[in-house]
């Protein structure tokens, strides 16, 4: 195999590969990226056995062929090469080496045979549709903060993507929760998606997927089966196993009857929460919200470190309410609001609280209060 | 100061008919011996021995159910007597405590030895409880001395004779050196303190890590730990050894539940809550397995600890039987920080917590067996 490729294109392909490979793994080949050159393209493939990413890009292929080499090392080399450099990759199968030449820099890297590289079995997909990158970006960006890291509830370690019935008909919905907070984000149903089985997209896949969604003009081809999901742009194909488990019935924990309405400028609110929580102890992180006629007082009282208080002008017309939250959770949901005011719907100090942006019900957050 | 057969002595004191009889405190269906009086001990009964085995050795023994509240009250009385000697007291259990008597001779007009002899006499006269004294220049040696001529013992290890005293003693005398450490030491050719003396400090460190460092000091009778009145508690745990190894999940979970209850009872009594739950298992081959998980919120609820340790248990692949199971809480916080954020996905948790609090109240009033979970019968 021998090919030449511009440094920028190579870096993009290799960086996606190196983030998929597992840093600590016991199977040497899994640290490698499979490079396959044929015709006018070169393809970089990496896997951790749960996720596989394939990046196909144009290159000047002199001699077709394939080999595998350490993804992290190759990435480090390409990253350090000067911008605009032309990189030539030459495989010497007899010596088991891949040479990387760019200008006056020459590297020789150990390779492993391409036959040993595990290729994810292709599978049948039940549903194929396409969605604009910004739509998927919103669905996952606004839900991923609520993904649980609890190993015992592995079925919460991802975003539940499924078809749901909303007021205006069927929607494509993403839900994530860790039991403390929950995010439910809806998007218009893409054509051909209505028979998609619900899947739990693992946290790592969500992170990798994000890199495919940077470009606003790209359509993402989505394929879904009971066990796998695939997201593809013309260049990159990301295939992932989905979490084998049942996502809990989240609808019943989204409060429908909360009537006490607070409307507040989200960024002012977040800044104030951040300021008062400075004095809260590491473990506690509790912020108390005291609500009265158009007035919100945020306070922290920590016996060890001190106290803080800040008042905000808000829209609130219900009876007095005192309710505590973990400051981190409040900040996280407040930062999801980007256009309008944050609207909180409370019931009592012990019940889940709902938050949304203005009257937009396509992005709904639930946060559990904390005893203060 | 270490009381002699404390639980059994209290029982004999309160029921003079038992005075000359072998008395075993303990019981329960899968009971083990909690304490045995000296009459029973002569017949071969030991603490932690399964009850059936103890009764085989001593069929005429009178088995008494433990009355922890009574023992706690007596312990408090003893504590009061000790307080008159020094404020620097570090209790190890209900019946055992370190006392730091440095600098008290001027105050009392008598050296520590005299005051300690008076203490045990007072305990015997006023409370009817015997105790043994170990007097030395640090905690490590005092503890060893207190075991030297039990019951009603009084042993002194002076600074000058420390080395000579230790040399021919086995290293298992060191508190915390169990069978595993003993085996490791034996493999290194260390059985007696004199064996330990032959090792360079660096070599012990290289072989046994920080534990080796400690051994080097202890071999020379050096122990700098202070007698601290309120040693902060770092963790609370409880474990139980079965009288028959088992791999039966139901039985193991029954034991686990009881351990969780004991741990959380203590956490509640001390107004503490733990953020990390630990499961400990000892396999038939004496391999120790520990697994821990950080909880969403610090807890002092038995149910929460049980659910957490149970799911740790279910994550293991059980290839063998077990001889011990234990549960623990660590990273302790004041209980004002406990169980503050309810779980959205577990709306029943609040009810379960209410049930547990109510159950605790009932147990406080009518005794710890007044109300139990079905699973504790397994």
Image (cartoon, coloured by chain):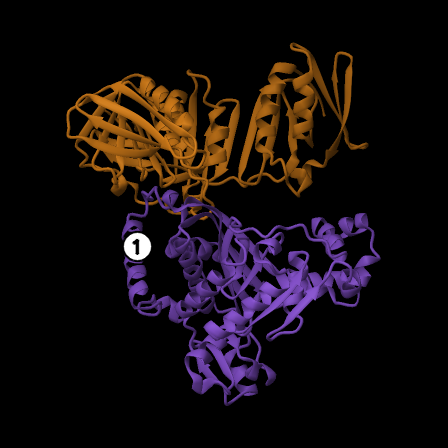
Chain colours: A orange, B purple
**Can you identify the residue that label 1 sits on?**
B352
Coordinates of residue B13 in the picture (x, y in percent): 45, 79
Q: Is residue A333 visible?
A: yes
Name the residue located 18 percent from the left edge and 30 percent from the top edge. Answer: A320
Q: Which of the two residues, A85 or B238, is positioned nearer the viewer here? A: B238
Pointer 1 chain: B
Query: Eyeballing the image, is A237 above or below B55?
Result: above
Residue that extends furthest to the right in the rendered view of this protein: B198
Q: Which of the two residues, B255 or A313, is positioned nearer the viewer here? A: A313
Residue that extends furthest to the top in the rendered view of this protein: A84
**Quick one: quadrant of the C terminus of chain B?**
bottom left
Residue A370 found in image quarter: top left
Name the residue located 24 percent from the left edge and 33 percent from the top edge. Answer: A322
Name the residue located 54 percent from the left edge and 58 percent from the top edge. Answer: B85
Coordinates of residue B158 in the picture (x, y in percent): 73, 61
Query: Eyeballing the image, is B188 above or below B342?
Result: below
Name the residue located 56 percent from the left edge and 39 percent from the top edge. Answer: A120
How crowded is the residue under tag 1: few (<14 C-alpha within 10 Å), some, or many (20+)? Answer: some
In the image, taking residue B219 as reference, residue B90 lies left or right, namely left
Helix, strand or loop under label 1 = helix
Q: Which of the two residues, B268 or B137, is positioned nearer the viewer here? A: B137
**Quick one: quadrant of the N terminus of chain B?**
bottom right
Q: Is residue B254 visible?
A: no
């Amino acid at each position: 195999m021998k090919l030449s490729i511009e440094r920028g294109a190579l870096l993009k392909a290799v960086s996606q590969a190196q983030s998929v490979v597992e840093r600590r793994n016991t199977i040497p080949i899994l640290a490698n990226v499979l490079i396959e050159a044929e015709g006018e393209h070169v393809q970089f493939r990496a896997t951790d056995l749960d996720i596989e990413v394939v990046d196909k890009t144009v290159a000047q292929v002199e001699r077709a062929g394939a080999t595998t080499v350490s993804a992290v090392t190759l990435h480090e080399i390409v990253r350090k090469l000067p911008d605009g450099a032309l990189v030539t990759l030459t495989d010497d199968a007899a010596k088991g080496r891949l040479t990387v030449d760019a200008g006056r820099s020459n590297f020789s890297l150990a390779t492993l045979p391409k036959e040993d590289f595990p290729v994810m079995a292709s599978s049948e997909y039940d549903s194929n549709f396409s969605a604009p990158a910004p739509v998927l970006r919103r669905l996952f960006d606004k839900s991923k903060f609520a993904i649980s890291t609890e190993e015992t509830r592995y079925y919460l370690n991802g975003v539940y993507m499924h078809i749901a019935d909303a007021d205006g008909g069927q929607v494509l919905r993403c839900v994530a929760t860790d039991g403390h907070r929950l995010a439910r984000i809806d998007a218009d149903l893409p054509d051909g998606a209505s028979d998609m089985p619900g899947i739990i997209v693992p946290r790592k896949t969500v992170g990798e997927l994000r890199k495919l969604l940077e470009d606003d003009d790209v359509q993402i081809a989505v394929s879904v089966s009971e066990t796998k999901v695939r997201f593809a742009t013309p260049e990159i194909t990301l295939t992932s196993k989905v979490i084998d488990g049942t996502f809990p019935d989240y609808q019943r924990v989204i409060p429908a009857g909360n009537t006490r309405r607070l409307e507040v400028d989200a960024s002012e609110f977040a800044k104030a929460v951040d300021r008062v929580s400075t004095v809260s102890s590491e473990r506690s992180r509790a912020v108390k919200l005291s609500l009265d006629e158009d007035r919100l007082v945020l306070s922290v009282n920590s016996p060890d470190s001190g106290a803080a208080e800040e008042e905000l002008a808000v829209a609130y017309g219900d009876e007095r309410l005192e309710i505590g939250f973990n400051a981190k959770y409040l900040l996280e949901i407040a930062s999801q609001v980007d256009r309008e005011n944050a609207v909180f719907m409370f019931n009592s100090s012990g019940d889940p609280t709902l938050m949304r942006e203005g009257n937009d019900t396509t992005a709904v957050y639930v946060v559990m209060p904390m005893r203060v | 100061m270490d009381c002699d057969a404390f639980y059994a002595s209290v029982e004999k004191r309160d029921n003079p008919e038992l005075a000359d009889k072998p008395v075993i405190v303990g019981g329960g269906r899968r009971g083990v011996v909690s304490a045995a009086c000296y009459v029973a001990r002569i017949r071969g009964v030991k603490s932690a021995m399964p009850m059936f085995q103890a009764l085989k050795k001593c069929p005429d023994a009178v088995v008494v159910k433990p009355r922890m509240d009574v023992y706690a009250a007596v312990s408090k009385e003893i504590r009061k007597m000790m307080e008159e000697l020094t404020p620097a007291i570090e209790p190890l259990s209900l019946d055992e405590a370190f006392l730091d008597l440095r600098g008290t001779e001027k105050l009392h007009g008598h050296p520590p030895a005299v005051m300690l002899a008076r203490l045990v006499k007072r305990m015997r006269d006023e409370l009817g409880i015997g105790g043994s004294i170990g007097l030395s220049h640090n905690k490590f040696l005092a503890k060893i001395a207190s075991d030297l001529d039990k019951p009603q013992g009084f042993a002194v290890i002076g600074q000058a004779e420390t080395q000579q005293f230790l040399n021919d003693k086995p290293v298992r005398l060191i508190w915390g050196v169990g069978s595993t450490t003993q085996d490791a030491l034996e493999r290194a050719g260390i059985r007696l303190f004199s064996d330990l003396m032959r090792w360079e400090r660096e070599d012990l460190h290289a072989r046994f890590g920080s534990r080796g460092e400690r051994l080097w000091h202890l071999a020379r009778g050096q122990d700098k730990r202070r007698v601290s009145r309120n040693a902060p508690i770092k963790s609370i745990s409880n474990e139980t050894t079965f009288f028959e190894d088992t791999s039966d999940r139901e039985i193991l979970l029954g034991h686990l539940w009881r351990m969780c209850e004991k741990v959380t009872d203590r956490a509640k009594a001390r107004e503490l809550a733990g953020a990390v739950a630990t499961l400990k298992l000892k396999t038939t081959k004496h391999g120790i397995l520990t697994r821990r998980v950080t909880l969403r919120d610090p807890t002092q609820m038995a149910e929460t600890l049980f659910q957490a340790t149970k799911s740790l248990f279910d994550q293991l692949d059980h290839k063998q039987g077990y001889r011990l199971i234990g549960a623990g809480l660590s990273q302790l916080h004041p209980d004002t920080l406990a169980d503050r954020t309810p779980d959205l996905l577990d709306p029943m948790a609040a009810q379960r917590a209410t049930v547990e609090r109510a159950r605790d109240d009932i147990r406080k009033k009518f005794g710890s067996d007044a109300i139990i979970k079905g699973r504790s019968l397994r």
